[in-house]
Image (cartoon, grey):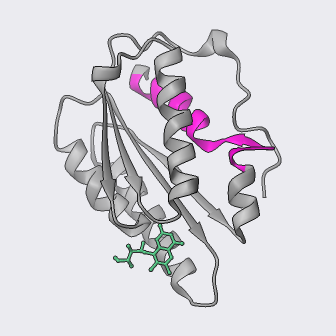
Amino acid sequence: MATKNLSEYNTEKVPDASNMIFGIVVSEWNPEITGAMLEGCVNTLEKHGALPENIHVKTVPGSFELIYGARQMTLNDGYDAVIILGCVIRGETPHFDYICQGVTAGIARLNATNNIPVVYGLLTTENMQQALDRAGGRLGNKGDECAVVAIKMAKF
Ligand code: DLZ
């Protein structure tokens, strides 16, 4: 597990986002985590100039549906970058591995085949505490990191 603070970055290296349009797809599973990630993501996009009306948020039932949601958004040429936000916590079922592998492969494929970057904001943790640590807790917020990556990739 990374110990880097996800909210720490060099602001001077982040381009101006005032002319950029972002799509965000958020999973409803573990909503206290994905809600905090979304809040961090939107705040950081706006901190770098993105206009609230240029940040479009859609929800999907679970992380596996993030692939479909991101795909639908990338079909819309209007986006400069799409961000997926989800959280999968390892349980007693094999779902964890299947879901994580599926989402990772799906998002990788979108990045390899489309013209719009899709930023991978999927927390994959052993337990709830590790997720809380990365959703505004002691290790920062994965949503902040995704916002910065999205701005940089939109500029790429
Ligand atoms: C089924 C499932 C399980 C067991 N765990 C999670 C999870 O921790 N995080 C998450 O985002 N989604 C989970 N899901 C739901 C799946 O992502 C998906 O929504 C369902 O399998 C239906 O396709």
- Can you say whether 41 is above or below 45 in the image? below
Q: Quadrant of the C terminus?
A: top left
- The answer to whether residue 152 shows anywhere in this view is no
Give percent across and percent down for residue 138.
Answer: 81, 44
Q: Is residue 49 visible?
A: yes
Magenta-drawn segment: 134-154
Give percent across and percent down for residue 120: 49, 49
The image quadrant where one finds ligand 1 is: bottom left
Instruction: Please indicate whether residue 54 sits to the left or right of residue 72 in the image.
Output: right
**Which quadrant of the view contains residue 9?**
top right
- Seen in the picture, residue 137 relative to 154 is either above or below; the reply is below
* Side of 34 relative to 54 (left or right): right
Residue at image location 49% in from the left, 41% down from the top? 38
Identify whether 132 is placed above or below 114.
below
Q: Residue furthest bottom?
A: 93
Q: Quadrant of residue 132?
A: bottom right
Residue visible at 56% across and 55% down?
A: 32
Q: In the displayed structure, would residue 95 be above or below residue 113?
A: below
Q: Is residue 144 magenta?
A: yes
Task: Name the quarter where the N terminus is drawn.
Answer: bottom right
Q: How many marks?
A: 0
* Residue 128 placement, left or right of 153: right
* Residue 141 falls left or right of residue 105: right
Q: Residue at the spot x=53%, y=32% of the render?
A: 149
Please provide percent x and percent y for residue 152.
Answer: 50, 24
Residue that protrudes farthest toward the front in the picture = 32
Magenta stretch: includes residue 65: no
Residue located at (29% from left, 23% from top): 54
Q: Main secondary structure of the magenta part?
A: helix
Residue 91, position in %: x, y? 63, 83
